[in-house]
């Protein structure tokens, strides 16, 4: 299986980076091919220029590569912190520039954009791993978990991803080494469950 793995955190020593590393190693151990992108480390430019908006726009080679990889992916793993109830701006920009019409979705014939698009991604399963420093009960009661709406409804359902599993790890800032080790093991187990080896799929 070909899996796209996207990490969006500026600190290579962060727990987000550890989560991405655990997922990456687990995927490789299961025999999957992985296109891994650490957006901050790669200096991904999140700004969508006007010239890229049109479906037939000519794209920079780096954006074209991201688009081609995502279009071919059968699985997707995204790792990012919860910042202000949103993904980091660099990841929002990745969504803007890579989840393009003709790549991630299309409008049906006769629909000029006013209707509901049809998803195009081949991704069957997506795993989104988030971190937070807000206690889970407060997150639900006060904020309503906006990341769930973003990933489930605004991204996965719209782009044709059939299965989404999302896990929020927290509170990270007060977590112990033992707790973080248990969370990393949980990630490895989730990857094995959601992305079984090709010979067992």
Image (cartoon, helix red, strand yellow):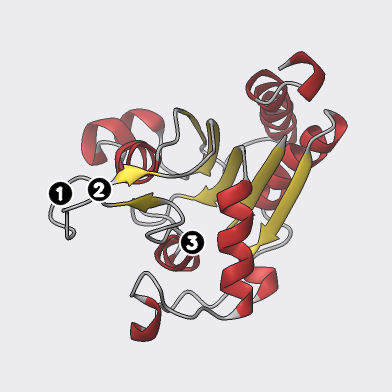
Residue closest to the eye, 195 or 2: 2
Mark 3 surroundings: few (<14), some (14-19) or many (≥20) residues within 10 A: many
**Residue 136 shows up from this direction:** yes
* Residue 3 position in % (x across, y down): 68, 42
**Residue 9 shows up from this direction:** no
Choose the circle earlier in sequence order: 2 or 3: 3
* Horizontal side, residue 141 vs residue 100: left or right: left
User: Residue beneath label 3, please?
Assistant: 91
The residue tagged with tag 2: helix, strand or loop? loop
User: Residue beneath label 2, please?
Assistant: 108
Residue closest to the eye, 195 or 189: 195
The relative height of residue 108 versus residue 169 in the rendered view (above or below) is below
Badge 1 vs badge 2, beta-carbon distance below 8 Å: yes
Q: How many marks?
A: 3
User: Residue beneath label 1, please?
Assistant: 115
* Residue 127 position in % (x across, y down): 55, 34
* Horizontal side, residue 124 vs residue 201: left or right: left
Choose the circle earlier in sequence order: 1 or 2: 2
């Amino acid at each position: 299986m070909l899996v796209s793995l996207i990490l969006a955190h500026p600190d290579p020593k962060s727990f987000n980076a550890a989560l991405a590393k655990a997922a990456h190693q687990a995927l490789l151990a299961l025999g999957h091919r992985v296109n891994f992108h650490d957006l901050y480390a790669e200096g991904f430019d999140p700004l969508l220029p006007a010239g890229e908006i049109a479906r037939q726009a000519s794209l920079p080679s780096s954006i074209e590569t991201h688009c081609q990889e995502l279009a071919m992916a059968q699985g997707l793993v995204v790792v990012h912190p919860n910042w202000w109830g949103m993904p980091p701006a660099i990841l929002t920009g990745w969504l803007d520039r890579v989840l393009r019409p003709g790549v991630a979705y299309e409008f049906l014939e006769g629909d000029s954009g006013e209707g509901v698009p049809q998803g195009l991604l081949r991704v069957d399963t997506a795993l989104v791993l988030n971190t937070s420093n807000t206690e889970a009960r407060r997150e639900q009661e006060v904020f309503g978990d906006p990341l769930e709406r973003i990933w489930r409804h605004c991204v996965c359902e719209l782009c044709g991803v059939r299965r989404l599993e999302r896990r929020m790890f927290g509170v990270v800032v007060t977590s112990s080494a033992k707790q973080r080790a248990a969370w990393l093991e949980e990630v490895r187990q989730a990857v094995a469950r959601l992305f079984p080896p090709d010979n067992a799929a």
